[in-house]
Image: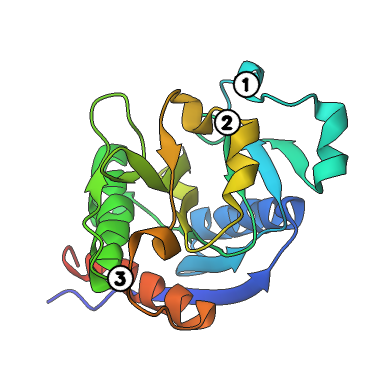
Amino acid sequence: MRSPRTLEVWKLGTVNYLKSLKLQEKLVSERKAHQIPDTLLSLQHPPTYTLGKRRTDHNLLIPESELTKIGAELHYTQRGGDITFHGPHQAILYPIISLRSIGFGARNYVETLLERSMIEFASIYGVKARAGNKCETGVWVGDRKIGAIGVRISSGITSHGLAFNIDPDLNYFEHIVPCGIADKEVTSLRRETDTLLPSEEVIHEQLSVGLLFSQSFFL
């Protein structure tokens, strides 16, 4: 019988985006070398826009020179996906996981771990979320996006991950075409539920446990 897999969870609080990027790169290298177990980073960022490797700058609707006026930064990354926003009151999970050791490809990883964990988490608060339709990435409530996904896979090791909107300032999304999908709204758990929300620490814990539980299905 195979022994249970280990997924170590790091609760980091609010972390500067570049600092988290360097940390992910370090952990990916260590995971490739089998120096660490699968690891999950749970955190938030200060207001930050990030672009994926396709460099779709046209989906940033505000001059880069104006970003400091709204208290935001812009960073380019090597993840998949289009432009997105990260900020306070958003739950972010960055799994550093070996897909080869669990026999998963990129699609199964996104659908089984990332999408499903957000959908099941939303259901705790009576919110019926769904995976995106064709050409729609992330997780949606009706036609409103509540969770974004953007991943990088290098030699079978994942980085980047998901961002679930708890109660962020949605005005920041007005300055971008979120994930490159025009004419769609962005929403949050706060907007979609009548349930009193617990502390964000509890919410981060619930979302992390949801991903752990999803992982247990294919151990």
The one of 4 and 150 positioned closer to us in this rendering: 150
Residues marked 1 and 2 touching at CB (< 8 Å): yes
* Res 136 → quadrant: top left
* Res 55 → quadrant: top right
The chosen color scheme is: rainbow
Q: Looking at the picture, which amino acid does disc 3 mark? A: Gly
Residue depicted at x 67% and y 24%: 61
Q: Secondary structure at mark 3?
A: helix
Q: Residues within 10 Å of mark 3 (few under 14, many from 20)?
A: many
Residue most extreme to the left: 1
* Residue that carries the numbered disc 2 in the rendered image: 52
The one of 85 and 28 positioned closer to us in this rendering: 85
Residue 210 shows which numbered tag?
A: 3
Q: Earlier in the sequence, mark 1 or mark 3?
A: 1
Residues marked 2 and 3 touching at CB (< 8 Å): no
Q: Looking at the picture, which amino acid does disc 2 mark? A: Gly
